[in-house]
Amino acid sequence: MEKYTIEIERDGKFFVAQCIEYPNCFTQGRTLRETLRNIREVLELMLNVKNPQMEAHLMDEAVEAIVQIA
């Protein structure tokens, strides 16, 4: 199972997420939950795998999430 680090920042009314290991892998969402779901889907499509494991850590100005891919 692989793990990926996701950085999530608030941008106005949206959260924007980017995978640190794959800088061109990014998405957005209106809520943190939606954003995490969207970045998981992007990683699944990009890596052609199902159900990556994800763990998010909330910080003051950004969120760092660890995504695990089976």
Image (cartoon, helix red, strand yellow):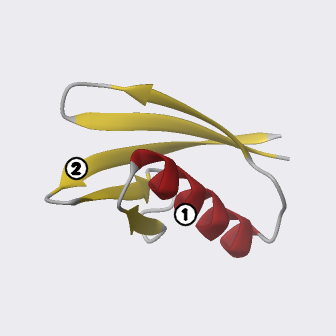
Quick check: 35 above or below 6?
Answer: below
Left or right: 54 as drawn, with respect to 25 = right
* Secondary structure of the residue carrying numbered label 1: helix
**Real-space Cα separation, disc 1 to disc 2, in angstroms:** 15 Å
Residue 44 is situated, as x and y percent measured from the top left of the image, at 72, 65
Q: Are marks 1 and 2 in contact (CB under 8 Å)?
A: no
Residue 28: image quadrant is bottom left
* Secondary structure of the residue carrying numbered label 2: strand
Residue 67 is situated, as x and y percent measured from the top left of the image, at 63, 42
> Mark 2 belongs to which amino acid?
Arg
Name the residue furthest left.
12
Left or right: 37 as drawn, with respect to 25 = right
Question: How many residues crowd around disc 2 within 10 Å: few (fewer than 14), some, or many (20 or more)?
Answer: some
Name the residue nearer the viewer: 8 or 25: 8
Residue 29 is situated, as x and y percent measured from the top left of the image, at 39, 63
Quick check: 17 above or below 42?
Answer: above
Residue at figure coordinates x 83%, y 63% from the top left: 49
Residue position for label 2:
10
Residue at figure coordinates x 80%, y 71% from the top left: 48
Q: Which mark is residue 28?
A: none
Residue 51 is situated, as x and y percent measured from the top left of the image, at 81, 53
Residue at figure coordinates x 42%, y 63% from the top left: 23
Quick check: 65 above or below 35?
Answer: above
Residue at figure coordinates x 49%, y 56% from the top left: 34
Residue position for label 1:
38
> Mark 1 belongs to which amino acid?
Asn
Image quadrant in which the N terminus is located? top right
Q: Earlier in the sequence, mark 1 or mark 2?
A: 2
